[in-house]
Image: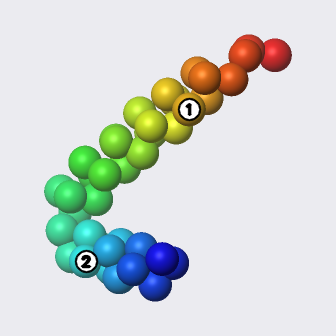
Amino acid sequence: MFGRLHSYFRIQLQSPLVVTITTIRKIKLMRQIAGDYPKI
């Protein structure tokens, strides 16, 4: 799985636009996951 993920990121590095979109999606996903946990 890690190898597939690594090659996936390697392909993304060739396209800055895709990297930007993916980064935004990651931030949204991280915020959504963090939102599932109760605020301390």
The quarter holding residue 13 reads bottom left
Q: Secondary structure at mark 2?
A: helix
Local crowd size for mark 1, using a 10 Å CA cut-off: few (<14), some (14–19), many (≥20): few
Q: Residue at x 25, y 48 (%)?
A: 21
- Sequence-wise, the earlier of marks 1 and 2 is 2
Q: Is 40 displayed left or right of 7 in the figure? A: right
Q: Secondary structure at mark 1?
A: helix
Residue 3, compared with residue 33, is above or below; it is: below
Give the residue number, with chain letter if any, for mark 1: 33
Taking the view exactly as shown, the residue that stands out farthest to the front is 1
Q: Residue at x 61, y 29 (%)?
A: 34
Q: Nearer the viewer, residue 10 or 36?
A: 36
Q: Nearer the viewer, residue 36 or 23?
A: 36
Q: Residue 17 — which label?
A: none
- Percent across and percent down for residue 23 are 37, 49
For residue 38, say whether it is visible. yes
Q: CA distance from mark 1 to mark 2?
A: 26 Å
